[in-house]
């Protein structure tokens, strides 16, 4: 069968049809061997269409060697079926059908890391979204739910541990040195949740007693050498189990909950029923090798996968277009969980920052798509910031509209009503609406409309009438295939502050009495006007509190108002945003001014920053976030025809100026927080470290002997990776950093996850030879083009996080990216497609770079044998 070239017809959401056959049960036997694994699948199918003629029985399959097919016990010959490049088709079947299929796959040769593959000596599967069809012929779609058993047979020496979904049933030995284990999963599931792991792994364990008194055995498996670093993940799993019971009354439903870490994995982790598999980056953490951010990421990712057990597995998706039904919801839940661990305000600011830097850019570029896309060529390209993070914001808006109790009611109704089913986003929203007696018809547009909405707010104070009016206009820019947009239902959380920063009681003019000092206003029309009464003096508006909707808000605020909000508002997001907005305008102004000598930094601004460094500042973690300059991507997104090299230089020069202006307070704050206490990972201490290292990073812009000594001292004395990496990163851009860089590389050469940090420090470096060093490091013995973490740390980090060198005027960065995309595409299309996203920002570049990028995209697009994954990304970018 020849592969269809060019762009295959897209899959469309509205073409959904229910499955022609359902599956009652699947019994799998794997005779595991890294070179050739034989898979025997007995599938019991039931035709669904009783009216009219039955349909052919179509089973998905990709890159499989078919050994035999038996239909109801009878061996079939090639004349009895059609075998295509992506399916095995049998004649229509009238009744219950028993199909025995034997296929052979080659795990060792599978570098795409989807289906059954090898990671070091471990064999494992990744089936979401369409990996199961690379294991056997099967109706590989999420609305076909079946009960699975799985028998794993393998050499006992090489694969002492054999794991699959559900609970372990039985095991035994064979005379030839092989052993076997049978697993049974009582919960019906779609094929994308199937998993197996086989290898020489150790484990640590603990038990968890559920609220109703059942004991669950919780285990974390990893390479023996990694086990000492897995305790934090085991604790995170138990914390997540307790949290879901407390918040939502959701209990675990099997006797064992197993987590496994592997080194080669395309994404972060996977929620296979009862057998969550993690990229080791998100399972391993100890103070010597992991930073505070790594510890926090382990908490978040472990919780995310655990939460999928109810929102994803027990209730799954009807089709892959509904992906955000489980992903947006799981992200929302992991963000809330992380907020409860490290403080909701700080967590919120971090989440909003990530959303605005990544998702807003996605929504403004050539890959913009709705939270629920309408079509795709490759579903694996749709595990995006929009589906995950904007999807989470959509869920959060429901929480903002209905409050904690109303949200909980809606979630419980959704889970109980759809338990065991494959559901849609409409059904989720319908449950929320019903549980709260609300009409969410207009709200559904958040799922269908791409692009970041804009709110333009015009405040009017009438001193004579003592009224304060907010006129709010909403609009949304056009996105690919969506030229015109409808108005959305937007919750806008507001408070009004008096000149001392205190909240004013709120009464809208049509209300009899004031109620509360914080409100959620609801926008539904293109223009909405809200008038507050009894406002004695012009207030300072505190709007979009908690970032109550994923929008860009534009409002005329004076510098004084911004400083007041940054200092006194009790909403952490508004505090951060006020300073961030001020800094953004300052930096954009400097960029637009070109070569003109920049005006000095306003003292009001530097005073506000200096206040963050004082001991009285209540929340160092928030202060650290407020101290940071807006990121390159945020500034880039606000400009047209950008010269990225000049923009990067404006950022650097401003950092240096701030460091010079705040030199003493920065040193003093660093000294105060560098308290010599031994490392403990918790919210309070990691917040102090974040502020301390924020100071360090500014100071490193300066070339004083004091700073040099400080950097080297922190690098040498650190008892933890957070402080050591902060010093290393700060030193990497400086002339005096080479010795330390070399020392770090030597010290951690046996530890790939730590060496990844070192690769990334090189990849992000401002030094002129950054690209040359990246190329050299690709020959480092630990680097491997088949490992997504290595590629991510070095190649993807350079192309996405080093704007200064990636956008080099001579085109060397673009040429490098193109060369790597083509090389990696043959190894792992998912990784190549991710890298290809580095060109998405081209429409905002200056004309000369734009032309270079377009030419580069054409070369990639025209290359022979490009994968569908990469060709979809490149094709969208180059129209
Ligand atoms: N469902 C996984 C999660 O927890 C993502 C897995 C996607 N894997 C992939 N190869 N596309 O978010
Ligand atoms: Zn997920």
Image (spheres, rainbow, N blue to C red):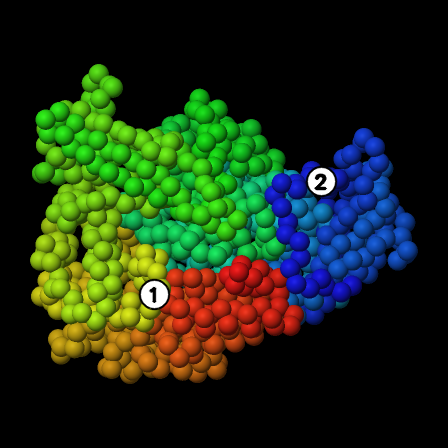
Q: Which of marks 2 and 1 is in front?
A: 1
Binning the other alpha carbons within 10 Å of mark 2 as few (below 14), some (14 to 19) or many (20 upward) gives some
Q: What distance separates the C-alpha of mark 2 from that of mark 1?
A: 49 Å
Location of residue 598 (image quadrant): bottom left
Which residue is most to the top? 512
Q: In this view, does 44 lie above or below 282?
A: above
Identify the element where label 2 is drawn: loop
Indicate which disc residue 19 carries: 2
Residue 497 percent location from the top left of the image: 15, 36
Q: Earlier in the sequence, mark 2 or mark 1?
A: 2
Q: Do the residues labelled 2 and 1 touch (CB within 8 Å)?
A: no
Horizontal side of residue 536 vs 250, given as left or right: left
Seen in the image, is 95 located left or right of residue 199?
A: right
Residue placed at 38% from the left, 29% from the top?
A: 402
Q: Is mark 2 within 8 Å of ligand 1?
A: no
- Mark 1 element type: loop
Residue, disc 1:
642
Q: How crowded is mark 1: few (under 14 residues within 10 Å), some or many (20 or more)?
A: many
In the image, is residue 326 above or below residue 730? Answer: above
Percent from the top left, x then y, of residue 397?
38, 36
Front-most of residues 669 and 522: 522
Most foreground residue, 652 or 856: 856
Residue for point 24% across, 38% down: 458
Q: Position of residue 97 (x, y in %)?
A: 82, 41
The label number, if any, that marks residue 215 in the structure image? none
């Amino acid at each position: 069968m020849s592969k269809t070239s060019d762009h295959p017809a897209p899959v469309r959401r509205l073409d959904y049809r229910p499955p022609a056959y359902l599956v009652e049960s699947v019994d799998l036997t794997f005779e595991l061997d890294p070179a050739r694994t034989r898979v025997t699948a007995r599938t019991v199918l039931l035709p669904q269409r009783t009216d009219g003629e039955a349909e052919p029985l179509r089973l998905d399959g990709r890159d499989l060697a078919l050994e035999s097919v038996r239909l109801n016990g009878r061996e079939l010959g090639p004349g009895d079926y059609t075998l295509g490049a992506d399916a095995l088709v049998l004649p229509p079947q009238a009744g219950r059908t028993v199909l025995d299929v034997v296929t052979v796959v080659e795990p060792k040769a599978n570098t795409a890391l989807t289906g059954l593959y090898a990671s070091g000596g471990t064999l494992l599967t990744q089936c979401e979204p369409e990996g199961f069809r690379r294991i056997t012929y099967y109706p590989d779609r999420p609305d076909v739910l079946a009960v699975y058993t799985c028998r794993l047979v393998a050499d006992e020496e090489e694969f002492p541990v054999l794991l699959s979904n559900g609970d372990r049933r039985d095991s035994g030995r064979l005379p030839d040195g092989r052993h076997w284990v049978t697993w049974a999963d009582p919960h019906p599931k779609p094929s994308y949740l199937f998993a197996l792991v086989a290898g020489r792994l150790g484990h640590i364990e603990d038990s968890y007693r559920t609220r109703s008194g059942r004991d669950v055995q919780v285990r974390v498996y990893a390479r023996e050498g990694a086990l000492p670093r897995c305790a934090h993940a085991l604790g995170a799993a138990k914390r997540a189990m307790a949290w879901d019971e407390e918040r939502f009354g959701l209990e675990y439903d099997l006797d064992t909950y197993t987590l496994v870490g592997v080194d080669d994995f395309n994404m972060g982790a996977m929620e296979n029923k009862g057998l969550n598999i993690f990229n080791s980056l998100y399972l391993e953490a100890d103070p010597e090798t992991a930073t505070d951010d790594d510890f926090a990421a382990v908490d978040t990712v472990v919780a995310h996968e655990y939460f999928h057990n109810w929102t994803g597995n027990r209730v799954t998706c009807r089709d892959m277009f509904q992906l955000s039904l489980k992903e947006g919801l799981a992200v929302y839940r992991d963000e809330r969980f992380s907020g409860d661990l490290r403080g909701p305000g700080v967590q919120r600011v971090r989440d909003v920052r990530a959303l605005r830097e990544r998702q807003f850019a996605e929504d403004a570029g050539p890959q913009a798509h709705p939270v629920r896309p309408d079509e795709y060529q490759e579903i694996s390209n749709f595990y995006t910031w929009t589906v995950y993070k904007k999807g989470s914001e959509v869920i959060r808006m429901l929480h903002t509209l209905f409050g904690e109790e109303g949200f909980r009611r809606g979630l419980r109704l959704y889970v109980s009503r759809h338990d065991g089913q494959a559901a849609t986003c409409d059904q989720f929203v319908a449950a929320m609406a019903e549980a709260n007696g609300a009409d969410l018809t207009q709200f559904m547009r958040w799922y269908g409309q791409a692009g970041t909405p804009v709110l333009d707010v015009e405040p009017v104070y009438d001193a004579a009438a003592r009224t304060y009016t907010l006129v709010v206009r909403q609009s949304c820019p056009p996105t690919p295939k969506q030229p015109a947009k409808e108005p959305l239902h937007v919750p806008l959380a507001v408070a009004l502050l008096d000149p001392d920063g205190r909240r004013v009681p709120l009464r809208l003019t049509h209300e009899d009495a004031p109620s509360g000092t914080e409100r959620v206003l609801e926008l539904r029309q293109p223009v909405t006007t809200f008038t507050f009464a009894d406002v004695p003096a012009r207030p300072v508006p505190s709007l979009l509190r908690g970032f109550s909707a994923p929008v860009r808000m534009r409002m005329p605020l004076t510098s004084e108002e911004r400083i007041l909000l940054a200092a006194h508002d009790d909403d952490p997001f508004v505090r951060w945003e006020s300073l961030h907005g001020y800094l953004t305008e300052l930096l954009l102004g400097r960029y637009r001014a070109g070569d003109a000598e920049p005006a000095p930094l306003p003292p009001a601004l530097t005073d506000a920053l200096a206040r963050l460094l004082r001991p009285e500042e209540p929340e160092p973690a928030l202060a650290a976030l407020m101290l940071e300059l807006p990121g390159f991507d945020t500034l880039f997104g606000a400009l047209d025809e950008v010269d990225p090299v000049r923009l990067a230089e404006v950022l650097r020069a401003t950092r240096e100026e701030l460091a010079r202006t705040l030199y003493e307070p920065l040193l003093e704050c660093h000294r105060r927080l560098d308290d010599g206490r031994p490392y403990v990972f918790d919210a309070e201490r990691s917040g102090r470290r974040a502020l301390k290292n924020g100071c360090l990073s500014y100071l490193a812009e300066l070339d004083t002997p004091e700073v040099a000594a400080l950097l080297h001292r922190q690098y040498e004395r650190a008892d933890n990776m957070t402080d050591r990496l902060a010093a290393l990163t700060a030193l990497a851009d400086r002339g005096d950093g080479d010795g330390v860089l070399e020392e770090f590389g030597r010290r951690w050469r046996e530890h790939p996850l730590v060496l990844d940090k070192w690769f990334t420090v090189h990849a992000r470096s401002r030094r002129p030879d950054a690209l040359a060093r990246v190329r050299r490091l690709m020959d480092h013995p630990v680097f491997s083009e088949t490992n997504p973490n290595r590629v991510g740390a070095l190649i993807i980090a350079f192309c996405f996080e080093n704007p200064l060198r990636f956008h080099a005027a001579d085109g060397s960065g673009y040429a490098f990216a193109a060369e790597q995309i083509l090389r990696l595409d043959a190894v792992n299309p998912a990784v190549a497609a991710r890298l290809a996203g580095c060109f998405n920002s081209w429409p905002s570049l200056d004309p000369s770079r734009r032309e270079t990028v377009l030419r580069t995209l054409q070369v990639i697009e025209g290359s022979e044998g490009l994968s569908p994954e990469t060709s979809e990304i490149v094709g969208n970018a180059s129209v």
